[in-house]
Amino acid sequence: MNKFKDTFVNSRDLGEFVSGYFNYLNVLQMKLNITNINDVINCFITAREKGKTIYFAGNGGSAATASHFAQDLGEIGRKARVRSFKTISLTDNVSLLTAICNDYGYEKAFSIQLSELFSRGDVLVVISVSGNSPNVIDAVKQAKEMGGDTIGLVGFDGGKLLEMCDYVIHVKTDKGEYGPVEDIHMILDHMITSFLAFKLMNEKVKTK
């Protein structure tokens, strides 16, 4: 039995389960590698300074996180009234996604899009709890071939993406704990984009 299931089994009622769930998320957060988070932030900053585009991709719940992360990061410039981060979520065009999957196979869902859009120096962020989804793995290969940087947000044991990506934030859990990993990935979205928003706004104030 994994730690997440233990939270339910050892709870006498809903209140204890809720408390245990939040406590477990806190444990996972405290285990995150801060240096790796800083590396991702610096990669985003470099992309912005060079006018490069940051792409996001994922499946299922991670597709929603990819879309959300792309929107949050792209919104920073408007909120801070400075030059924005250029972001694109590869999960959002349903017509294009279904056409690619139908005609070329699901594993090509993102790599074919990148082959048309990606430029040297751009950044690809892939979000995969298992770290083994074939279409994000193929996308990472495509981005690397085209001279881009790759970032992986993963869970469980990290899967193949742990070694493939240039930068990785790894939420270490037992296999099967999708919910808690996806929760932390969303927290990382809000934490990273909040930090960058405050940083840009503070730099703007200092230059006045």
Image (tube, rainbow, N blue to C red):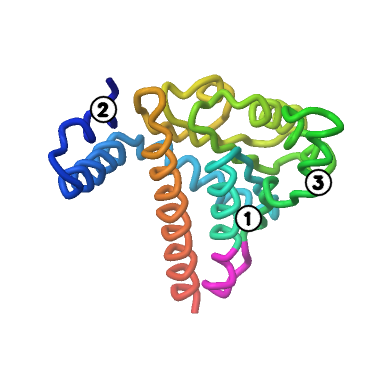
User: Residue 34 at what x, y percent from top left?
Assistant: 35, 40
For badge 3, the amino acid type reads Leu
SS of the residue under disc 3: helix
* Label 3: how many Cα within 10 Å (few below 14, some 14–19, many 20+): some
For badge 2, the amino acid type reads Lys
Could you say which is closer to the camera, residue 57 or residue 177? 177
Q: Which residue is labeled 1 in the image? A: 49
Q: Nearer the viewer, mark 1 or mark 2?
A: 2
* Label 2: how many Cα within 10 Å (few below 14, some 14–19, many 20+): few
- Residue sitting at 84 percent across and 29 percent down? 104
For badge 1, the amino acid type reads Glu
Q: Which residue is labeled 2 in the image? A: 3
| Most common SS among magenta residues | helix
- Among the 4 quarters of the image, the one containing residue 124: top right
Q: Earlier in the sequence, mark 1 or mark 2?
A: 2
Stretch of the chain drawn in magenta:
75-84
Residue 37 in magenta stretch: no
Q: Earlier in the sequence, mark 3 or mark 2?
A: 2
Residue 83 in magenta stretch: yes
